[in-house]
Amino acid sequence: MKRLKDTRETALKASRAYYAHRAYYEDLLAQRQRRFAKANKREIGFLEYAFNACPTRSVKDVLDVACGGGRHVFGLAKLGYDCTGMDYTPERIQVAKERAKRLGVSVKLLQGDATRLSFENEFDAVLALYILFLLPNDDDVLRCLRLIHRALRPGGILVCNVGNPFCEGKHWFSLKTVYDGLGVVEDRAPGIRSTEVFRLRDFDPMHGVAWWQETSTIEASDGIHIFRDRERLRLFTYWDIVHYLQLAGFREVKCYPDWETNPPKKPKAEMLVFVSRKD
Ligand SMILES: C[S@@+](CC[C@H](N)C(=O)[O-])C[C@H]1O[C@@H](n2cnc3c(N)ncnc32)[C@H](O)[C@@H]1O
């Protein structure tokens, strides 16, 4: 297998190829699954909780720096927030625009890179959800968080999340997967079935990165599709994120494992959700 050069451009290109094509079917699958609708509702509920709990700012203007198909911005727009969604992959922005039209929600949608944000003092809240693991290197993670800090108005909040490597489930980010290496995930919903065979290779514990290789087969009403993907993924611990947020200038970093608003100590949670504030 040919090794890809480990550069920022390679990572972005691989990510774009994946999200431009495979993600269309992922979205289709998700839209038809009750489980997904439930998870989505929980995340929107959490965001509303975090906005209302912000003691320093009344939240109205929200930016999502990697909005994908737009699920978070659409949910928030329906609750009355003024939302801007941005994503690096133009095909995802196009899909989001079509969906916004179908749903009748008004959201500003832009193509852009989360590590090249040009906003300044424009938002009361910023979301960086299911994105930090895709940023190519430590400099990009820090730059992204610093630019989010600049995009926020004083007192505004950032909500971001990462998968917890110490979780017990069979997620790609669990240490079990990192060391066992190989995984198979089958998923189905009415009219669509997906089988994903993946492995994590070349885990570099110094930098917390691994190469993800995947072959997935999607059976949908428009035929059978085979996708092959290779991406560079970053694993973070709780302390990595706390450290990055502090370096980027954020204060009062709070962690809510698994989107629970009354968080118990849960070192084996699947998802670590962070809310932090700009002074
Ligand atoms: C796992 S999806 C998450 C999408 C969305 N936040 C959600 O939870 O549904 C990751 C998204 O990040 C986008 N992305 C990857 N690199 C990016 C970058 N540098 N800037 C902005 N978006 C990026 C991809 O195009 C993809 O839509």
Image: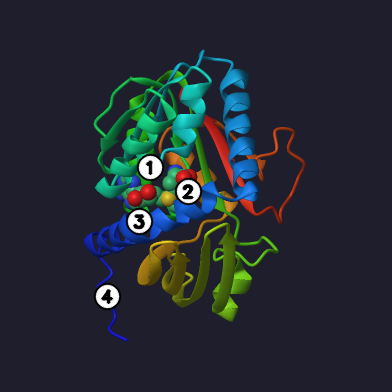
Residue bearing mark 4: 4
Classify mark 1 as within 8 Å of ligand 1 or not, answering yes or no.
yes
Residue bearing mark 2: 130
Front position in the image: 3 or 101: 101
Q: Quadrant of residue 47?
A: top right
Residues marked 1 and 2 touching at CB (< 8 Å) = yes
Give the secondary structure at mark 1. loop
Q: Residue at x 28, y 46 (%)?
A: 88
- Of the numbered discs 4 and 3, the one sitting upstream in the chain is 4
Front position in the image: 239 or 95: 95
Instruction: Name the kind of residue labelled 4 in the image.
Output: Leu
Percent position of residue 59, x then y: 49, 17
Separation (CA) of disc 3 from disc 1 = 11 Å
Instruction: Name the kind of residue labelled 3 in the image.
Output: Tyr
Q: Is residue 83 left or right of residue 78?
A: left
Residues marked 3 and 1 touching at CB (< 8 Å) = no
Q: Residue at x 62, y 44 (%)?
A: 39
Residues marked 3 and 2 touching at CB (< 8 Å) = no
